[in-house]
Structures are given as C-alpha cells and as structure tokens.
Amino acid sequence: MAADQPAWWTRAVVYQVYPRSFMDSDGDGIGDLGGVLLHLDHLSDLGVDVLWLSPVYPSPQADNGYDISDYQDIDPLFGSLQQLDELITALHARGMKLVMDLVVNHTSDQHPWFLESRSSTDSPKRDWYWWRPPREGMAPGDPGAEPTNWQSFFSGPTWELDEASGEYYLHLFDRRQPDLNWENPEVRQAVHEMMRWWLDRGVDGFRMDVINMISKDVGPDGHLHDGPPLPGAALGDGSASYLCGPRIHEFLQEMHREVFAGRSDALLTVGEMPGVTVEQARLFTDPSRGEVDMVFQFEHVGLDHGTSKWDIHPLRLRDLKASFGRWQAGLADVGWNSLYWDNHDQPRAVSRFGDDSPGFRRDSATCLATLLHLHRGTPYVYQGEELGMANYPFRGLEEFADVESLNHHVHAVSAGHDPAEVLDALRYMSRDNARTPVQWDASPHAGFTTGTPWLAVNPDHVEWNAAAQRDDENSVFAHHRRLIALRHTDDVVALGDFTMLLPDHDEVYAFTRSLGGVELLVVCNLSRTPYRLAELLPEAPAAELVLGNLPDDDPAELRPWEARVLRLP
C-alpha cells in the first residue's frame, strides 16, 4: 500500500453492533433497528467511522441470525427494510458508513433454496448444497455412515440425514445451517446478484462470515476426504478440506470482479477467516489481487485454548506479543491488519485479557484499548467494549442461550466430563458473555428495554453504563474517544512502521510506531505490578506524553495497568 495514497480505512475505526443486544425500541426484549437509530449519536460522539451490523435478515434464529432464510429482506424481529434505509441515510448524514454481515458459506434450512434442494434428488437446486449418500456398504442412519468423519463447530457430526431421500447434507455449523456448494456457478451468481442489490441500496461493504470456508477440497468424482481423528473423540478434524480450500482465491477474485469492480473506492470488504495464516492473509489482502481489504484472523484469541476453546489455559503475554508481532511484520509491506479484542463470538476483553476486579477494571479496559488501537491496522470496537463491559456472572446452565455453548454441554457431559468443570468453561468462554444487553443506564434492564430482555442484563450495569460515562473525562468511553481521535489526526498512528520491544517481558507490552522521522513509543503494563520505566526503556522518561490512561502523577513509574503513548525526541 503506497503511503502517499493510503486507503480511507487505514485511519478508520469500526464499531460492531449485535442488534439483538444493542437497544430494544418496541419493548419485546429484543434489540432492533429502531434501537440502533435511537443511539446513533452515541457512535457519533465516540467518533467511529463505520458501523458493522450483525445479521438482521429473516431467520429462524437457530444461530441468532447467522442462519439466513432470505438474503434480501429484514426480519420483522428487527424491523423493516424502510428502517434499514433510514439507518443508511442517518449514518451517511453523520459521515459514517454501514457494513452488513454477509453469511454465504451456509443458509438456513428454511431458505427457499434449501427447501427446493431438499424437495427431490432431481431438484434443479439439489447441487446448490452438499448432498451425499451414506458411506459405501452402509445404510442411511447407521452409526458412522456419514459421508465423512468431520466434527461440526457446534459439536456432533457435520452431516445430517434427510430421511426422505436417504442422503446426508453438509453443515459445518448447526444442522439448521446447511453449507452452500460454491462449486456450482449458479450459487455464486445468485450470491453476487444479492450483494449488488445491497450495494445499490447504499450499503458500504460487507463483513464476510467464515468466507474462507466456501471452497471445499472435493475430488473429481465429488468425493470429500476424512480428516485425522480428534483426540478423545469419535469424529475427525476436517478443516484441511474446507479452510482456505483450493478455489478460495478464485472465488474471492470472481466476487470482486462481479460485485465491487468499478464502484466507489469507499467500500470495505472484511473476510472472517478462521485458521488463516499470515502468508495466506498477505495474498487475501494484497490490493493488486482484488480479493478483500482485510481479514479477521483468530490466532491471538486461540492462545488461551488447549485442544478446544473450552480447554482453557492461562495466556502468556510473550505469546500474545509473538502473535501480534508476527501479523504486524507479515502485513507491513502489503495487505492490512484488522485489530480486535472481542466480538459477538468472544468473551469480554476486560474479563479475559484484563482485570475486571473493581480496583482495576477501568484501568485495564483503557490499557487494553490503548495497546490495540496503537497497532497498525483498522481497530474494531465491539458494542459495550467502549464502556468496559465485563463477562456475565452466570450461576447455572439455565442462564445460557447460545447454541454452541448448550451443544457443547450436552456432548461434553454425555462423554463423561465433570459437569461442574464444563459449566466453569462455559462461564468463561461462552459467546453469551458478549451478548448480554448493552448497558445504557442504571435503570432496570439497563435502559435496554421496557420489557423482559431476551438475555439477562449484567447486574453490574448500575455502576457500569453509558450514561455514567458519557460526560466523565476519566471514563473508558472518554479514553476510547481520545484513541479514535488520535488515529484520525496522527499519520504515524494510521500508517507508521511497527517495531516490537521487550518481546520476552511477561507483563509489559511495548513497541514503537515510526513515520517520516516521527516516532511514538507505546508502553502498557498488563499487570498489578509497578515498574520503574527507566529500567525497562531508558528513553521513555524524557519523552513527551501524547496520551495516557492514568493521571500523569509520576512519569518515572509505570503503574499497574498503565498505558502511555509517548513521542520520542
């Protein structure tokens, strides 16, 4: 990327809205587009440039809208197309853009395409999905008769038997989310037509859900391959057959040509890509290749995982530095990073990477924000992160709603795991932690709804809420606002080179950003231990403070969870 012609999104910040949990405007307990419209000034005050809207399409809600039954409408649960148009207009009037979630690896099993595909083995749309007979020599429904041994992301096999035809269909996620067959050009053409329809409506781009799974490694005879057995499980890991498959670059380049080429350069395309490597991301985000502008990678949010996300290990800071540093270096000369701590699929950052105890919650939330926003890439703020929202204090299984969490509990307990340990893992890692309603004020249900919220509001909302922070210059909200303004105004933050410092320190994260003779030193103490700054970084005490998250009392001491952005002489 040429420094003299940087893309607009190099100095942009994206805010993710998970509409079900953002704001409820009609009292049914579920957030909606009307609620988003009510709080646009909150986003405007924060200073963000892009609103990424999680799915609001018609859906049976098997996976909270990531199972879409109609790509070209709005679910009445969330409002109407007219309200979506109002949202586009209102955002554009405030100088912000709208990025929609694009979920095209799979549809709902209630989508007309799948209903037609399922209606007959001779259906014209049969090949729009992955239908396969049972294994040779086995009858439909026999144990192990599934066409491959792959385990689903939501537990259990990736194949569901259709009793009427005696064949199985593929679903990498929930059984109600059948995978589209991108090998069929008619599928790709239908997706491209839908995407153009949204862009023509004024949408400014797409965040593409698990887009690196659309190409499957399929043999000339249609055969899909078994994966290696998973430790302690009856099923296997099929990821080698569907993560960044053999035609993925071809498919994305075709999409770019058919959908984006010739349109305004103010659009944004973000590919969510589990398992993507730095080397692959360089290809995906190289502007000359015409694929996507940036990717979401998951390396850093897997560092506290063992054999699965539910097998929780302590995070070592040096591992986080190695991961972030590798991505900063790998995409330094070509491509671009997306930067995030949490989203609708991850637990709350302040509880996971920070310290959500009363004494350190505010400081660690602002320290983490400083660390992230000062890297090279486009930062993403997940709703409530700008308020320091924390994980929910789940008491029992009955308080969870997430299909992934509930499925895991069933399979883990039935496999003989200790129910108390399984529940502890859910409390820490469940996606429900990110989905509790946004805490707008101290009133009942945090001002989210006048009804009964679909998921319980965190009881800490009485203290931690937007109303309490908006006019408090010491708040988490105010610090995010300063960080976002710094990216907008300081070229070195948006475009500067990155150099990691102190790579082996277990508690202090430090790096420099440099551009055109200007150099910033960023130093963050991710612990409760104070450090003498000169002993760590001798050049730091004499540097000019650009932005800090704590009062500037003692420049010589780096206090617990303190973050400083310093301009070196």
Image (cartoon, rainbow, N blue to C red):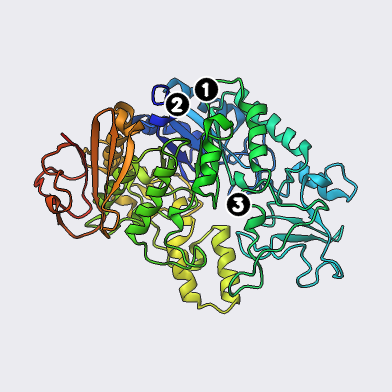
Under mark 1, the amino acid is Asp
* Mark 1 or mark 2: whose residue is earlier in sequence: 2
The picture quadrant where one finds residue 255 is top right
Tag 1 near tag 2, CB within 8 Å = yes
Under mark 3, the amino acid is Asp
Under mark 2, the amino acid is Ala
Residue 180 position in % (x across, y down): 72, 46
Camera-side residue of 203 and 334: 334
Camera-side residue of 204 and 303: 303
Camera-side residue of 479 and 501: 501
Q: Secondary structure at mark 1?
A: loop
Q: Badge 1 is on which residue?
A: 265
Q: Badge 2 is on which residue?
A: 7
Residue 121 position in % (x across, y down): 88, 51
The picture quadrant where one finds residue 407 is bottom right
Q: Badge 3 is on which residue?
A: 63
Residue positioned 61% across, 46% down in the render: 212
Residue positioned 30% across, 54% down in the render: 503
Q: Quick check: can you spot residue 28?
A: no
| Closer to viewer: mark 3 or mark 1 | 1
Q: Secondary structure at mark 2?
A: loop
Q: Quick check: can you spot residue 317?
A: yes
Tag 3 near tag 1, CB within 8 Å = no
* Mark 2 or mark 3: whose residue is earlier in sequence: 2
Near mark 2 (Cα within 10 A), the count class, few <14, some 14-19 or many ≥20, is: some
Q: Which mark is residue 371?
A: none
Rendered-image quadrant of the C terminus: top left
Residue positioned 61% across, 20% down in the render: 262
